Image (spheres, rainbow, N blue to C red):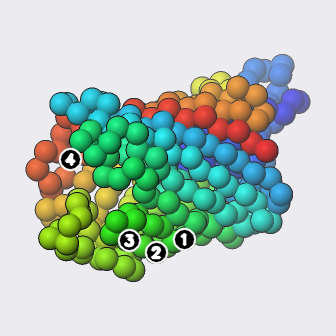
Amino acid sequence: MRSVAIPVVLGVLVGPGLGTVSAQTDKDTGAGAGVEVSEERQMTLPEGRAFVQVFAEISLSTDLALKPISIAPDLWYGLSDVLTIGLVHSARGATGFFSVAGDGLCLTGSDNGCPDVYHNIGLDARYHFYRSGGMTVAADGGLFARSFDPFQLALKVGATGRWQSGELAVELAPSIFAGLTEREPDAGAGVTVTTTNKEALFLPATAIYALMPKLGLAGQVALTVPFEETGDTWLLGLSIGAQYMVNEQISADLAFGLPALAGGPDGTGADARVLTLGVGYAL
């Protein structure tokens, strides 16, 4: 028997010991035969380990190609084997959504799709509390500054869970963001307001398949449900992605998505498109 690590693309976190799957494979019968999921794996980092991931978020939307382009870094650290904290900029880290552009450091300016030069930073925490067979669940929450001008602070309360069987995994990461400040800023106060800061549910559902020991493929359906005027504002997105484990420390991933494929707002459909490139490094 030989030990292999099955890479996956996750809604929130990736990297060795953080969402990868340890398996035992019989080398005489080929990869994938007799796979057993290790019960030591869970949705948090080991104590004292860190994971850095940087995303390049690129709009490919109709009439808005490369508007915006943003760089969103995330840093995660294991305070204990069951508690991981993170300094988060990306939509991947905040909500689990694959395909969002404009977070973190926005490079293309206000005339080219950037709401601000720098916005959407959060302090996130994940606490592992359940594991049974192929199922693992962790609580996930924190505080997020969604904008600095005006200062929109939101509380995140959620969870992330994964069911794993052999090379296939399914992950759900529901979260609710509740605005604490500037819930509905006054657009007449000399600021540009594109969104409110009221309650909304974010629900990414992700299916991941380990095509080979170093390559994982994923498909995601992402639902956004504001609590007010839901019928006019809900959104459904669809993304596909892949992750390649370069070695035990370095991972690279690519995702393409249609973040507003269906829903209540005007302008939904395939015109909105986002490409996300990510590189991760485990310390």
Residue 151 disc label? 3
How many C-alpha atoms fall within 10 Å of the one at disc 4: few (<14), some, or many (≥20)? some
Task: Say whether marks 1 and 2 touch (CB < 8 Å).
Answer: yes
Camera-side mark, 3 or 1: 3
Nearer to me, 266 or 22: 266
Decide which of tag 1 and tag 2 comes sooner along the chain: 1
Decide which of tag 3 and tag 1 comes sooner along the chain: 1
Quadrant in the picture for residue 178: bottom left
- Residue tagged 4: 262
Q: Is residue 128 visible?
A: no
> Where does the N terminus fall, quadrant-wise?
top right
Q: CA distance from mark 2 to mark 3?
A: 13 Å
Q: CA distance from mark 3 to mark 1?
A: 16 Å
Camera-side mark, 2 or 3: 3
x, y percentage for residue 235? 25, 54
- Residue tagged 2: 155
